[in-house]
Amino acid sequence: MRLQDCHNFHDFRRLARRRLPGPIFNYIDGAADDEVTLRRNAAAFEACDLVPNVLCGVAEVDMSVTVMGQKLAMPVYCSPTALQRLFHHQGERAVAAAASKTGTMFGVSSLGTVSLEEARRIGQGPQVYQFYFHKDRGLNRAMMQRAKEAGVEAMMLTVDSITGGNRERDKRTGFSIPFRLNLAGITQFALKPAWAINYLTHERFALPQLDGHVDMGGGTMSISRYFTEMLDPALHWDDVAEMVGEWGGPFCLKGVMSVADAKRAVDIGCAGLVLSNHGGRQLDGSRTAFDQLAEIVDAVGDRIDVMMDGGVQRGTHVIKALSLGAKAVGLGRYYLFPLAAAGQAGVERALDLMRLEIERSMKLMGCKCVDDLTRSNLRFR
């Protein structure tokens, strides 16, 4: 199977599975507990039908949107995800370049394997910096200052990960960072020698945003210890309000799911929020972001930019979310599998396919611009 034979999310997933060692593929593919929420994230879109209008004169469509003051050429963005260098040696460099070429937003993670300064140089388009709240308040302030100096426009605080989720697929293979594989995991790596050669012949794996705190050489602490020891489970709205004030620019909360929390985000001055259950990787049994979207938009959509992620695999999924009032839609696994399969070329192909799907769907819906997409175009079963 070749990259040019990939025409959708499932094709990219299959190609990535062929190229990645089992433990790494399952790290991307897996979720928490019984993975119920993971399955529901994609299935939620299937319970919603589109009702198109015809004869609307849609020779040209404008799919651009503005999110937190940043203009995106299309209403999807590459959500910040961790450890991308594990999936392909180009890592965040590939994603930043592909997103910039496509004219959409890219998120750099505090667990990213390329520095946010380098990512900012690569992609001149809209960017956000995603970070976690640490017990060390000085570290939080230092991260924000570093982002500001790098020219990042918006901060994105992940609020649903004050402790790590129970990801049993990783436990079965022994997957961890640094690697602590069991025999089954080592065997799966041995079956994919091309990945190992690629990994070992390029620059050393590192987490530049957390230098001195998480050492992939086996020094300071592992990723699992990072979540259990460095992040602050006592994180409270007062802490976030203080950070919003210190940042002084667009500030977004990722992982909000309730109306009450959405209203609090507005009250403390946030410019955006992302409805998200972390791709099903945190609280299994959590409601899907798509199912919760209308409720949140009705409550705060006129005062804050509401986005969502989780389970988005098609342009029609994006159309449904936009019709419910989302300003933009985040992609995660949708671009990670293409990254693993073919680096920057894979991510570019995936984003191009998504752009074409959204454009085609808007024409078939009879909509010239994103604002034309409304709930009148939807029916729930």
Image (cartoon, grey):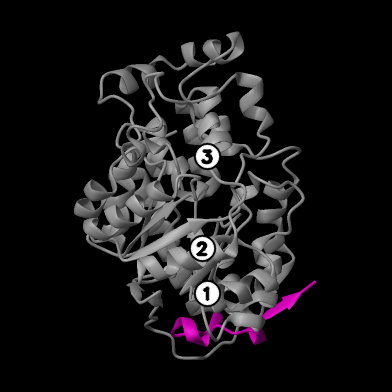
Label 3 – label 2 distance at C-alpha? 36 Å
Q: Which residue lies at the image location 62% right of the left edge and 79% below the top edge?
A: 297
Is residue 268 toward the left or the right of residue 125 in the image? Answer: right
Give the residue pinned by disc 2.
240
- Using the rendered image of the protein, determine whether residue 109 is visible from the camera's viewpoint: no
| Residue 178 found in image quarter | top left
Q: x, y percentage for residue 356?
A: 42, 65
Q: Which residue lies at the image location 65% right of the left edge and 24% below the top edge?
A: 171
Quadrant where the N terminus sits is top left
Give the residue pinned by disc 1.
268
Q: Which mark is residue 377?
A: none
Q: Hey, what amino acid is under mark 2?
A: Val
Tell whether label 1 touches label 2 (CB within 8 Å): yes
Q: Is residue 371 magenta?
A: yes
Label 1 – label 3 distance at C-alpha? 40 Å
| Residue 238 found in image quarter | bottom right
Identify the magenta region: 365-381
Q: Which mark is residue 13?
A: 3
Mark 3 is surrounded, within 10 Å at the Cα level, by few (under 14), some (14 to 19) or many (20 or more) other residues, namely many
**SS state under label 1:** loop
